[in-house]
Image (cartoon, grey):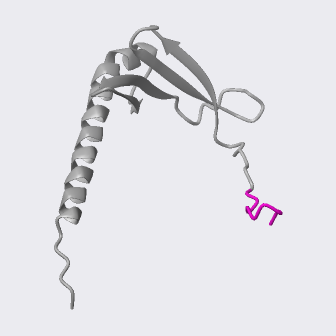
Amino acid sequence: MSDTGLKRIQVVIDPNTLYLEEIYTDLKVGRIRKLTPVRIDGELDKSRKSIFVGETQLGVKGQIIPIQCEIDAKGLADAVEKYPAAIEATFEQIVKEAEAAKKAQKENESRIIVPK
């Protein structure tokens, strides 16, 4: 332990799970990140498939909500086509989770504590 009282942590990048990242954007709505699997030597790793991630920000009641979701796509054109539905589904899930958390908080606050 150091003099500051903080524990040291070991941060290690797994050389077997490396990805090359490419970003595509329309400069208006959002962006799509393509993560292409690579080996430690930088060559493509054809034993793993590419991952597409959609990203955007939505303004709701004066707040900016970042949205990020995986897009099940075979290529960039497919990812662009599926982008709107993937973002919408993720936003709906965020809303459901927020409503459930708000409901749980209200229920927790409304409990009556009876002294023994």
Residue 80 quadrant: top left
Q: Quadrant of residue 89?
A: top left
Q: Is residue 82 visible?
A: no
The location of residue 39, given as percent across then percent down, is: 71, 34
Name the residue rendered at 39%, 24% in the picture. 57
Res 60 seen here? yes
Residue nearest the observer in this picture, 51 or 28: 28
Tell me residue 29's x, y (percent): 38, 13
Q: Quadrant of the N terminus?
A: bottom right
The picture quadrant where one finds residue 46 is top right
Location of residue 116 with respect to 59 vertically, above or below: below
92 lies left or right of 41: left
In the picture, which quadrant includes the C terminus? bottom left
Magenta residues, dominant SS class: loop
Residue beneath the point at 72% across and 26% down: 43
Relative to 103, 52 lies left or right: right
Residue at the extreme bottom: 116
Q: What percent of the width, then of the height, locates residue 54?
A: 42, 25
Farthest residue, direction right: 3
Q: Taking 97 as reference, is 26 left or right? A: right
In this rendering, the count of numbered labels is: 0
- Residue at the front extreme, as displayed: 115
Q: Residue at x 72, y 50 (%)?
A: 11
- Magenta stretch: give its range: 1-9
Q: Return the x and y of residue 31 as percentages of the image width and height.
A: 46, 18
Q: Is residue 13 magenta?
A: no
Going by the image, does 109 lie left or right of 41? Answer: left
Q: Which residue is located at x 40 percent, y 20 percent?
A: 79
In the rendered view, tell whether residue 30 sits above or below residue 98.
Answer: above
| Frontmost residue, 26 versus 59 | 59
